[in-house]
Structures are given as structure tokens and as C-alpha cells.
């Protein structure tokens, strides 16, 4: 592709070199540079892509996209300066992959909790109704028979547009994706227009990146400037504000407010799922979803709203939800063959912990045993709150490590313990494997052990390394030793 065609939607502030070039590829990682490629110098949290320009040139890069012009460029290399290379990368990626976003109905889901479940439910509903749908999110990338791991909730724009191209080429007509606040702030979804954009809720998380809840909210709200229809949870205070501030067409949902467009009534919370009657204007349908918890009511309503925005009927949506499968790492029951239960859940914020513990408490006949930690190099302020929520929601807390990353696991644990009442008496075991083994070994009849924080993850991040840790394997190993 010609460089000028790649840059058609990019506004350069300065250009040096021949200006004409046949581009063989696009990259922002110098290790992936190849002869004839365009190298985009992106500033990251730990490193600056501009420092790797010499390496990219050594690999044969024919053109550079930069924020700062380098000195002593080879004569055959074109260098294009822009104000924001992240934004430019998204524009270039869209052009390089032939604008796949124009061939798909995109459904974007944002919010602190529920994004993964909602996108999986949306995909299930659409495919049950004959619409081939791709999925991009925390649990992975799915389309057709393809299933891949994902490095982050929302990929960098170059990878994201590449995935959308694969989905469109495979016959997908829709793509559901989790849209993280980081991806909105860092321009990863720039250029995408969403047929439906959903807001699940907003609770404390990622304040290490956003600073405060106001900035966190405003970043999330950016998604609703680029959608045809907004689907908003009216029972969340931030959702109410979003409804007041955004002017796009919307479908509001609620389990408490009759003025919402989509209302759940006669809600029945059961150990194996939820049932309700869903009302939209004059339409009424029975909802059944085999995932327990009040949060499942909201997730189902949100997914329903997204699919209604794409033209499905309420009856079609609810019929599809009735046989929706469970989602890995979300209230996932691990088979034990014993007289106690082990559940794995991704809950890693105070609100999500409170939700899952309240759900389990609603049907537990024995003790609720909560095992959890907190992520390193992330929002410190939520750690004592998680400690308080754990102490209040559990009969027994096992405090351990999550992904400590570069931090001292015991320092993280001290932060968690600082939020607990002196009467809590948690069991502290920093090694997560040992903690799981202890919880299983000391389980009593009818106990429910809730392993919180890791969910679908099969690794633990420690000192820059991803070490294998699958909680399902650890539970099985602990059961063998009983």
C-alpha cells in the first residue's frame, strides 16, 4: 500500500524524506519491524517508541510516524510528524486493514463490572438468531471456530483492526467487544462507530490510572459520543448522570424504575440462576438465565438492550438467554465430588466482591469462605475497602496474593488487612497455591469457598513474569491430598 493512502486520514505537522513509499506492513514494536514497513513511535508507560527508531531502521523500516523528528535520517526514509502517534496509529490501522469496521455492526460494552458477561451474552443471543458475531474481551477473542487468548481487555488499535478484518472476512456481521477506560483514554478504539454501546455500572477501580472517579467516569462516557444507540443501567447513579448528559438515542434498563425502557419485574434469585419478567412498552417476556446473582439480572438486561438496538425482538432475546452457557471465571463452579462447593469468580473490586458474596450468602447452607488478594501496581485505595467487604461478607476470609506484579505481596496484604475490623481474624497465606490448598483442606460440610480475583486467568504476575497458576488445577490437587 502507498504511504499516502495510509496517511489519508492523518494530519501531518511536518514531513521529511522522499514522501513516496510502498509500505509492506505497519508496526509499533521495533522487534516486528521488517523491510518496507511503517514504524509508529508510540509513547508508552515504561518506554518511548522514539527510542527504538534506530532499531526499526536497522530492520529496514521505510517510513516513520513520530511526534518528535529524529536527526540523521537515511535519505530513502520518509518521516512524518504528527501531534499524537496513538491517534495516528488507529487511523493508519483502519486504512491498512481496509476499514473492516464499516462491514460490521459493533457492540461496545463499558463499565467497571459485567463487561465480559454482557459481551458473551450478546454474542450468544445474536448467533442463536442467525447473526454471526465475533467477540473481543478479557476472556479472549472468538469468531467461528477461532478461540485465542487476549493480552488485554481491549487490544491496541493495530491488533484491534486486524481482528475486525479477520472477523469480517470469516463472515461475521457483528462484533461485540469490551471497551475499557484505558482503551478510550489511549485512543485504541479511535475511528470505531458502535451500533450499540452499553454502560453497565461504575465503581472504584483503576484510580491509579485515572486519579479520581470523575476522570474515570468522563473517560467511560467518551464511548457514548460514538454510538448510534446507548444502553444504560438506570439503577446506577453514574448511569443516571450519563442519561442526562448524552443526547444519543438510548435504551435504559432497570430492576427498580418503571420509567426505564426495559424493566425486570417479579425477579427470582435462585442458586442455579435467575428468573424474571421483562417488560418493554407493551411487550412482555419471561427471562431465564443460568447464572446466579442479582448482577445477572442487570447483565441480562444490558445484553438484551444491545440486541434490541440491533433489531431483535424481546421474545427472540429472552428465548436465546434461556440456554446461554456459563462464562469461565464468572461464578464458575469447580466440580469437587465433595460435600462443599468451590466457586471461581473474577471479582477484584469492592463492588464485584460484594455482589458475588451477597449472591452466595443468599443460598449458602454452610459457611461462606472468601479467598482473595489485590493486584499490585494498581489502585491502592481500594485495598482496605476490599478487606472490609471481605470481612463483612464472609464467615472466614483467607487473604492471599492476586497478581502482585512488582510489589511486595505482604505489603499488599497489609493494605487489605488495614480495612478489616479487629474481630475479622482472617487467615493470611501469601502464597496463593498454599492458600487454596488450606481452604480446601479445612472445608466443612455445606461450605462455599469463593476464590476471588483470578477468574479466567491461568497465570500469576510476579516480578515481571507470568507464572502458570490455574485455580482449577490447584483445587484438583488439593482434593487429591484430602
Image (cartoon, rainbow, N blue to C red):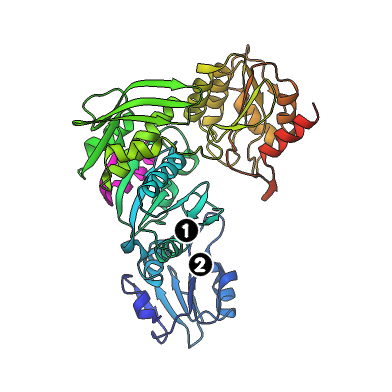
Label 1 crowd bin: few (<14), some (14–19), many (20+), radius 10 Å: many
Q: Is 364 part of what is drawn in magenta?
A: no
- The quarter in which the N terminus is drawn is bottom left
Extreme-top residue of the structure: 423
Q: Earlier in the sequence, mark 2 or mark 1?
A: 2
Question: Residue 431 versus residue 196: which sits nearer the camera?
Answer: 196
Q: Which portion, as a residue range, is magenta? A: 214-231
User: Is residue 215 in view?
Assistant: yes
Mark 2 touches mark 1? (CB < 8 Å)? yes
Seen in the picture, residue 170 relative to 399 is either above or below; the reply is below
- Quarter residue 321 falls in: top left
Q: Which mark is residue 28?
A: 2
Residue at the image position 48 percent from the left and 79 percent from the top: 24
Residue 391, x across and y down, in percent: 58, 18
| Left or right: where 432 falls relative to 151 | right
Relative vertical location of residue 196 with respect to residue 81 in this rendering, above or below? above
- Disc 2 from disc 1: Cα separation: 10 Å
Badge 2 marks a residue whose secondary structure is: loop
Q: In the image, what residue occupies the spot 74% across and 26% down? A: 438
Q: SS class of the residue under badge 1? A: loop
In the rendered image, which residue does mark 1 sit on? 156
Magenta stretch encompasses residue 225 = yes
Residue 408 in sight from this viewpoint: no
Q: Position of residue 380 (x, y in %)?
A: 55, 34
Amino acid at each position: 500500500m502507498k504511504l499516502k493512502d495510509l496517511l489519508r486520514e492523518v494530519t501531518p505537522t511536518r514531513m521529511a524524506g522522499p514522501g513516496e513509499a510502498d509500505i509492506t506492513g505497519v508496526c509499533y514494536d521495533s522487534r516486528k519491524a521488517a523491510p518496507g514497513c511503517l514504524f509508529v513511535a508510540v509513547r508508552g508507560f515504561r518506554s518511548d517508541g522514539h527510542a527504538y527508531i534506530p532499531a526499526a531502521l536497522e530492520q529496514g523500516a521505510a517510513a516513520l510516524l513520530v511526534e518528535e523528528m529524529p536527526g540523521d535520517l537515511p535519505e530513502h526514509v520518509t518521516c512524518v510528524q504528527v501531534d499524537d502517534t496513538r491517534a495516528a496509529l488507529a487511523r493508519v490501522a483502519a486504512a491498512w486493514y481496509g476499514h473492516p469496521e464499516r462491514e460490521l455492526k459493533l457492540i461496545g460494552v463499558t463499565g467497571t463490572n459485567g463487561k465480559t458477561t454482557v459481551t458473551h451474552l450478546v454474542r450468544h443471543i445474536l448467533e442463536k438468531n442467525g447473526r454471526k458475531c465475533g467477540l473481543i474481551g478479557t476472556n479472549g477473542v472468538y469468531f467461528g471456530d477461532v478461540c485465542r487468548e487476549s493480552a488485554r481487555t481491549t487490544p491496541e488499535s493495530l491488533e484491534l483492526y486486524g481482528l475486525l478484518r479477520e472477523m469480517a472476512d470469516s463472515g461475521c456481521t457483528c462484533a461485540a467487544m469490551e471497551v475499557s477506560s484505558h482503551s478510550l483514554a489511549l485512543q485504541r478504539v479511535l475511528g470505531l462507530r458502535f451500533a450499540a454501546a452499553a454502560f453497565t455500572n461504575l465503581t472504584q477501580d483503576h484510580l491509579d490510572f485515572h486519579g479520581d472517579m470523575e476522570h474515570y467516569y468522563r473517560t467511560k462516557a467518551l464511548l457514548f459520543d460514538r454510538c448510534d444507540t446507548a444502553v444504560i443501567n438506570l439503577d446506577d447513579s453514574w448511569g443516571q448522570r450519563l442519561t442526562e448528559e448524552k443526547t444519543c438515542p438510548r435504551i435504559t434498563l432497570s430492576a427498580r424504575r418503571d420509567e426505564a425502557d426495559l424493566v425486570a419485574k417479579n425477579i427470582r434469585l435462585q442458586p442455579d440462576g435467575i428468573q424474571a419478567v421483562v417488560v418493554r412498552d407493551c411487550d412482555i417476556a419471561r427471562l431465564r438465565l443460568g447464572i446466579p446473582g442479582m448482577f445477572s439480572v442487570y447483565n441480562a438486561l444490558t445484553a438484551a438492550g444491545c440486541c434490541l438496538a440491533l433489531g431483535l425482538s424481546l421474545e427472540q432475546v429472552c428465548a436465546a438467554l434461556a440456554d446461554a452457557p456459563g462464562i469461565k471465571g464468572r461464578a464458575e463452579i469447580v466440580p469437587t465430588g465433595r460435600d462443599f462447593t468451590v466457586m471461581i469468580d473474577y471479582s477484584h473490586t469492592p463492588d464485584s466482591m460484594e455482589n458475588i458474596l451477597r449472591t452466595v450468602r443468599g443460598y449458602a447452607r454452610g459457611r461462606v469462605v472468601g479467598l482473595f488478594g489485590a493486584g499490585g501496581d494498581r489502585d491502592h485505595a481500594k485495598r482496605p475497602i476490599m478487606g472490609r467487604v471481605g470481612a463483612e461478607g464472609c464467615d472466614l476470609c483467607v487473604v492471599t496474593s492476586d497478581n502482585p506484579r512488582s510489589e511486595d505481596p505482604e505489603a499488599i496484604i497489609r493494605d487489605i488487612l488495614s480495612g478489616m475490623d479487629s474481630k475479622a481474624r482472617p487467615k493470611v497465606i501469601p502464597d496463593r497455591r498454599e492458600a487454596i490448598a488450606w481452604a480446601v483442606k479445612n472445608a466443612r460440610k455445606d461450605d462455599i469457598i469463593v476464590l476471588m480475583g483470578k477468574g479466567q486467568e491461568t497465570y500469576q504476575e510476579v516480578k515481571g513474569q507470568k507464572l502458570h497458576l490455574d485455580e482449577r488445577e490447584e483445587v484438583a490437587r488439593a482434593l487429591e491430598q484430602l
